[in-house]
Image (tube, grey):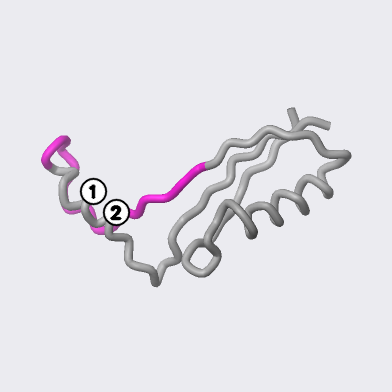
C-alpha cells in the first residue's frame, strides 16, 4: 500500500522561539496584521512511502519521527497519514 504523510514538527510550548519572535516583530512591516500575540515557526516534512498496512505505516512513521525528524528534547511532532 502507498501512503503519504505530512509530519508537523514544532518547538515545545516552554521552549523559546527566537526565530518566531523575530518574524513576529517584523510582520507589520510587510502586511497589515496588527497586534500579533503569538507566532511560532515549525517544520513540515512531506513523505511518500510504501507499507504493508496502515498499522505498520503508523508504527514506522512514529519511530522515524522520534528518532530522526524531531529533536524530542525540545520539539513535539504530529502527522497526517493518508493512503494514496
The percent coordinates of residue 12 (x first, y second) are 45, 65
Q: Which residues are magenta?
A: 29-44
Does the segment drawn in magenta span residue 41? yes
Q: Main secondary structure of the magenta part?
A: loop
- Determine crowd level at label 1: few under 14, some 14-19, many 20+ residues with C-alpha closer than 10 A: few
The residue singled out by tag 2 in the image is 20
The residue singled out by tag 1 in the image is 23
Which residue appears at 88% of the width and 39% of the height? 52
Q: Nearer the viewer, residue 63 or 33?
A: 63
CB within 8 Å, label 2 to label 1:
yes
The percent coordinates of residue 34 (x first, y second) are 16, 47
Q: Residue furthest right?
A: 52
Q: Is residue 35 above or below residue 49?
A: below
30 displayed left or right of 1: left
- Determine crowd level at label 2: few under 14, some 14-19, many 20+ residues with C-alpha closer than 10 A: some
SS at mark 1 in the image: helix
77 displayed left or right of 29: right
Q: Nearer the viewer, residue 27 or 48?
A: 48
The quarter of the picture where the N terminus appears is: top right
Which residue appears at 42% of the width and 50% of the height? 42
SS at mark 2 in the image: helix
Q: Is residue 27 above or below residue 10?
A: above
Residue 54: numbered disc: none
Which residue appears at 49% of the width and 62% of the height? 75
Amino acid at each position: 500500500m502507498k501512503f503519504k504523510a505530512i509530519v508537523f514538527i514544532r518547538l515545545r510550548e516552554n521552549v523559546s522561539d527566537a526565530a518566531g519572535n523575530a518574524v513576529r516583530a517584523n510582520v507589520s512591516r510587510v502586511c497589515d496584521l496588527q497586534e500579533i500575540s503569538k507566532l511560532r515557526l515549525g517544520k513540515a516534512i512531506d513523505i511518500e512511502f510504501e507499507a504493508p498496512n496502515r498499522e505498520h505505516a503508523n508504527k514506522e512513521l512514529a519511530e522515524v519521527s522520534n528518532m530522526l525528524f524531531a529533536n524530542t528534547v525540545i520539539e513535539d511532532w504530529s502527522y497526517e497519514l493518508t493512503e494514496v
